[in-house]
Amino acid sequence: MDVSPEHLVGQARERFQLHDYYGAIHLLEEVLASGRAFADAHHLLGLSYSLAGQNDKALAQFDQALELNPNYIEALIHRAIVLNELGREDEADAALRRAGQLSGETRRGFSSHVAATLANLRAALGDAYAEAGDLPEAIAQYQAALGLGPTFQDLRYKLGRLLLDSGRALQAREQFELIVRDQPHFLDAAAMLGLACFLAGDGLSARAVWEECRERRPEDPRVEAYLAMLARSDVPPSTPSLPSPPAASARAPRGGKRKKT
């Protein structure tokens, strides 16, 4: 049975609360291996690594969380703590200043922290609707979440997947394009962009996206599977266009007669 990343993260939280940090790490690394990690998963993995004494790995996970959600105040604060422990005081101070600035900002009349909390609650409600099979309401909840946190690209990624599951490939494509434009390194979103293009009937764009993904992550079997699927659908490979022949070569010389055979 395919276990959802949200379920695995929930199990990891339980292990974390029991101070079983290595158990949490094992579950969260499984989420990362699935290619469907989101900011909260990276943040919790960073916390688990830091409490297990692996600060370099913790820092990398906090950085990943902040790439997906630059306004993640808790990740900024915990990143600052780890940086301080690593002796990188200037960077730690900068992270704390950024967290302080965000806590004073407002979105839709809410403080940044409250807006982020509400966005995550909306997303959690969306997950519940999705598990219950009500995809339209799940999509509506994720759209509301993005209204509160428009830079939360991990939530946008999940919205895009829900739209794909609902057969709304063109709308999903728009969401994945926004993510890739903002975060070109988000290769999971790029892979989904290719799938959205394919399902929307644009096989050539899908091939271009997936071939770029393969160049950047050649070890990803999912991209190879997508390209194999594309080959079976008779979409031509991406090849450099050849120069057109000179116009004169397409015409017989004036006044000449074709020889009879």
Image (spheres, helix red, strand yellow):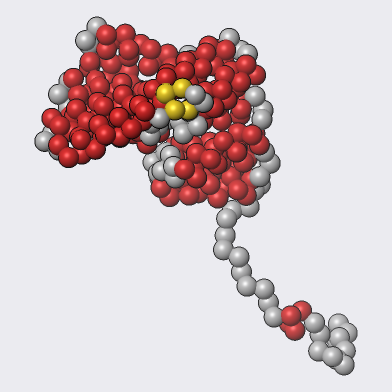
Quarter of the image for residue 144 reads top right
Relative vertical location of residue 198 with respect to residue 73 in this rendering, above or below: below
> Left or right: 148 with respect to 90?
right
Q: Quadrant of residue 72?
A: top left
Q: Residue furthest bottom?
A: 255
Tell me: residue 215, above or below residue 198. Answer: below
Is 170 or 2 nearer to us in this picture?
170
Q: Position of residue 197 (x, y in %)?
A: 62, 41
Relative depth, front residue between 148 and 168:
148
Query: Which image quarter: residue 69?
Result: top left
Please give the name of the residue rendered at 44% of the width and 42% of the height, measured from the top-left corner. 183
**Where residue 80 sits: x, y (%)?**
22, 31
Q: Nearer the viewer, residue 32 or 260?
A: 32
Left-right relation of 97 to 202:
left
Q: Position of residue 115 (x, y in %)?
A: 45, 22
- Going by the picture, which residue comes out furthest to the top? 18
Please indicate whether residue 213 sits to the left or right of residue 71 in the image. right
* Front position in the image: 160 or 249: 160
Q: Quadrant where the C terminus lies?
A: bottom right
**Residue beneath the point at 61% across and 25% down:** 165
Res. 198 visible in picture: yes
Q: Is residue 219 left or right of residue 225?
A: left
Total labels: the figure holds 0
Residue 114 on image: x %, y %:
42, 19
